[in-house]
Amino acid sequence: MKAADLLVAALENEGVKQIFGVPGEENLDVVEALRRSTIKLVVTRHEQAAAFMAATHGRLIGKPGVCLSTLGPGALNLTTGAAYALLGGMPMIMITGQKGVLSRKQARFQVVDIVATMTPLTKMAHQIVSPATIPAMVREAFRVAQQERPGPVHLELPEDVAAEEAPAISPVPAHPIALPIAPPAALDRAAQLILEAERPLVMLGAAASRPLLAEALSDFVRRVQIPFFNTQMGKGAVSGGSGLYMGTAALSERDYVHRAIDRADLIISIGHDTVEKPPFLMGRGGPKVLHVGYLPATVEEVYFPHAELIGDVGPTLALLADRLEGQLPRANALLPLREQILAHIGERATESRFPPTPQRIVHDVRQVMPEDGIVCLDNGMYKIWFARNYRTHVANTLLLDNALATMGAGLPSAMMAAMLYPARRVLAVCGDGGFMMNSQELETAARLRLNLVVLILQDNAYGMIRWKQAVDGFADFGMTFGNPDFVAYAESYGLRGTRVESAEDLAPALEAAFAGGGVHLVVVPVDYSENIRVLVDELRAQAKRDEEK
Ligand SMILES: Cc1ncc(C[n+]2csc(CCOP(=O)(O)OP(=O)(O)O)c2C)c(N)n1
Ligand SMILES: [Mg+2]
């Protein structure tokens, strides 16, 4: 048995079903061990996509996804994915090769210090130096990756260590981990704050989307009946139909949802992670904030809670609800604002101008997605519109990245969702910029025979930056580009493509794409004049009117 076999046995012991990546010659012993294992090796066309897929695996089911690369160039291609998982709180394991460390027959060819590179991008980065350490090291890697706050872990296996004869050591079994729950005194203090509040509001943040938390959170909201809003990454954490959803804070201030936030006197902030673009800006004199989380709040200029409840969030919330249920006559004080907030958000959602508005696109996507359908966004202007306008009813059905906010993750994250949930509809929504950053993965998606629809919003530009340029009064410069014929591009991969030619065609085109199965590209132009009309002019005018009142 070689060390590589020991590594793969340890991965099997962790329940790993597939590994994504691009091997190099330094990984060949690991590849051979994988060939003889129950684990499937899924080669991608770029390591970045492999890392985005592995991270999304962790995000969606709470267990680390695994990716693999060679040394130097391949490992460096994993770095954006590492940062994506680190900032996004997604458990992931990265395994990279390295030249031999016991002798250096190739001198420094391709050698980059990857452990040092990965150190600031991971929770832990280690080189494996001896076969006997592998079982414990792999177990520790998974424990660290999975433990709150979840994130990526890097293991480097040099080729000579991988090829070494290894003792037959059994893998280390996982031990159950029970997290502490907030102490009774802290729960009493928090309950007191909430009982005294005149206009309480719940905010659900990124950690509220942890896959195992959905039920406990929904219970809490139902039991206390306090209206809630969410951050972009907290979207979908409470199952639908509660009648208490007030909106999503896609901007940091002045959006319609901020009418409720600004009027609240207490915000119960559940699972907020300050990696997200601030959902509101704390200042002196604003609402008090009670932070509920697995970990204490990091203090920022715009976030400095007045009280905290730290511990396993689900059980902690249950204990808090025990102290509050039926005792909050003012729980719904802010609820009367709900209707007007949601009505404003819904404007222009059915207009038939062409190219369609972002509001119309979000509306039509919602129409063709069943409640449990999963929409995976890349990064671009439409992210704000989807965060703001798309209503979710099931946890983790709108996957977006408001942490690293990298372009290029839309397609790979949707591919992972389609692999994990073959019976659910999965849609990637990408700008023409972000799609082209990892479009080569269409080949991987085709090879894996995934059922997946990719909606490309074509404006022949880096629209989001062009918008910011205009908002800040700069000249329109340097943001436009040409595009391939996306339908022909899809066909060149053996896939189907549809170009939407009228507003009325969008929903039927998506419907037909899903019905046809396989991977299908749907291309639609988008009218981004709404960005300035709504997100700047209208909101500024409203804020001014509100101030004058
Ligand atoms: C990897 C990466 N590069 C650059 C950026 C900065 N950026 C954010 S949005 C954006 C434009 C996105 O363009 P596109 O994908 O076409 O979407 P659009 O905004 O046009 O809808 C850019 C360049 C980023 N977030 N990530
Ligand atoms: Mg674009």
Image: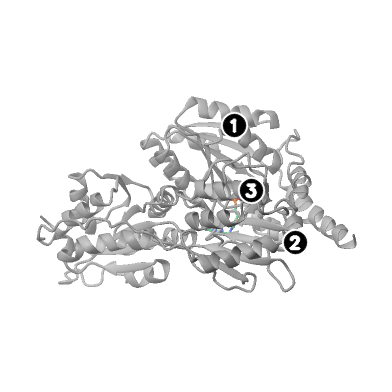
Q: Amino acid at mark 3?
A: Tyr
**Is there any visible trace of residue 406 in the rendered image?**
no
Task: Tell me the residue that label 1 is attached to.
Answer: 368
Q: Residue 49, position in %: x, y?
A: 42, 51
Left or right for 75, reference 412: left
Q: Residue 254, position in %: x, y?
A: 75, 59
Q: Quadrant of residue 195?
A: bottom right
Question: Viewer-nearest of labels 3 and 1?
Answer: 1
Q: Residue 251, position in %: x, y?
A: 68, 57
How far, Cα to Cα, is label 2 from label 1?
Answer: 35 Å
Question: Quick one: label 3, few (<14), some, or many (20+) residues within 10 Å?
Answer: many
Q: Amino acid at mark 1?
A: Val
Label 3 sits on a secondary structure element that is helix
Front position in the image: 393 or 358: 393
Q: Residue 50, position in %: x, y?
A: 38, 51
| Sequence-wise first label, 2 or 3 | 2
Residues at marks 2 and 3 touching, judged by CB atoms closer than 8 Å: no
Task: Tell me the residue that label 3 is attached to.
Answer: 382
